[in-house]
Image: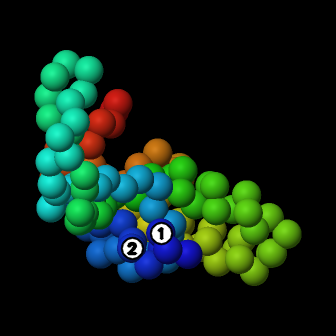
Amino acid sequence: ARAIRVGSHGFEDNGKSGIPPSYFSYNITKWELNGGKNTVGLPTVNALAMEVGRFPLFLEGPTRYLKTVIDDEDAVNDMYGKVRKSGLRDEELKMYFVSASLKGQSYDMGRMM
């Protein structure tokens, strides 16, 4: 439920699709040095504040959600309809994409596509 509230944002995605997002990133916005060092001698910090980064939709989110509501036919049909209307569906080919468009996303997100 928290993931759906945070939403997913990407190219042509306003985050209000009702489809559970799959991936997030966290950017530390405020920190303090804690006096420690990592294995290569760099200083370590304690995070005091973070921002949630949002990525475009991936098919993994609704797939995992469906595994949790398999006995609720209404929930299954509702999610199926949302995915069909989303950027995860290629109507021309009548198939699904692994992810919505990644246009505008940094390679820093770690994707392997």
Mark 1 crowdedness (10 Å alpha carbons): few <14, some 14-19, many ≥20 = some
Mark 2 crowdedness (10 Å alpha carbons): few <14, some 14-19, many ≥20 = some
| Three-letter code for the amino acid on which mark 1 is drawn | Ala
Q: Is residue 76 left or right of residue 56?
A: right
Residue at left offset 73%, top offset 63%: 68
Task: Give how far across and how far down residue 14 sits, in percent.
Answer: 29, 75
Task: Give how far across and how far down residue 71 sits, in percent.
Answer: 85, 69
SS assignment at label 2: helix
For the C terminus, the image quarter is: top left
| Label 2 – label 1 distance at C-alpha | 5 Å
* Residue 6 tag number: 2
Is any part of residue 50 visible from this angle?
A: yes
Q: Are the residues flagged by discs 2 and 1 in contact, CB closer than 8 Å?
A: yes
Is any part of residue 88 visible from this angle?
A: no
Q: Is residue 18 left or right of residue 77?
A: left
Task: Give how far across and how far down residue 22 sits, in percent.
Answer: 47, 55
| Three-letter code for the amino acid on which mark 2 is drawn | Val
Q: Which residue is mark 1?
A: 3
